[in-house]
Image (tube, rainbow, N blue to C red):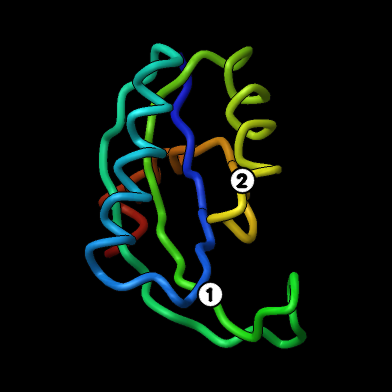
Amino acid sequence: MKKYEGMFIFYPKADDQALEEKTGVVTAEITKLGGVVNGVTRMGRATFARPMKKSDAGIYVLINFELDPLSVDQLRKRYRLNEDVLRVQIFQRRTAPPVAAEPAAAQA
């Protein structure tokens, strides 16, 4: 399984309880596909530069999860046609390479 970050943009009409339910549905879908949800971060409401699907703003939710690479495409397809979600972007999380420590002689 690989680590991913999914940015889900929901319609701005959702209140806190409805947003929590919609986020729960997304995390349940990830676990149903055999994945593990590591964290959910609400990024808040933001206005778009130009309207998207007749909406001027959206509520951003970032979900960190681990999932089999073959199942990621299934997850994208399920939320592409979902009426509650404006947009879904899923990226593979990459860890930064370790920074090499400078030798002590170079510092002196």
Above or below: residue 36 compared with residue 70: below
Residue found 38% across the figure and 46% down from its top: 63
Quadrant of residue 27 within the rendered picture: top left
Q: Residues within 10 Å of mark 2 (few under 14, many from 20)?
A: few
> Which residue occupies 69% across, 43% down?
80
- Above or below residue 95? Residue 104 is below
User: Percent x, y for residue 43?
Assistant: 37, 70
Identify the residue position indicated by label 1 in the image.
58
Q: Position of residue 75 (x, y in %)?
A: 58, 29
Name the mark on residue 34. Answer: none
Residue 15 screen position, x and y as percent: 31, 73
Dot 1 lies on which element?
strand
In this image, 81 relative to 99: left or right?
A: right
Mark 2 secondary-structure assignment: loop
Q: In this view of the protein, which residue sits in the foreground, 11 or 3?
A: 11
Residue named by callout 2:
82
Comparing 4 with 79, the one in front is: 79
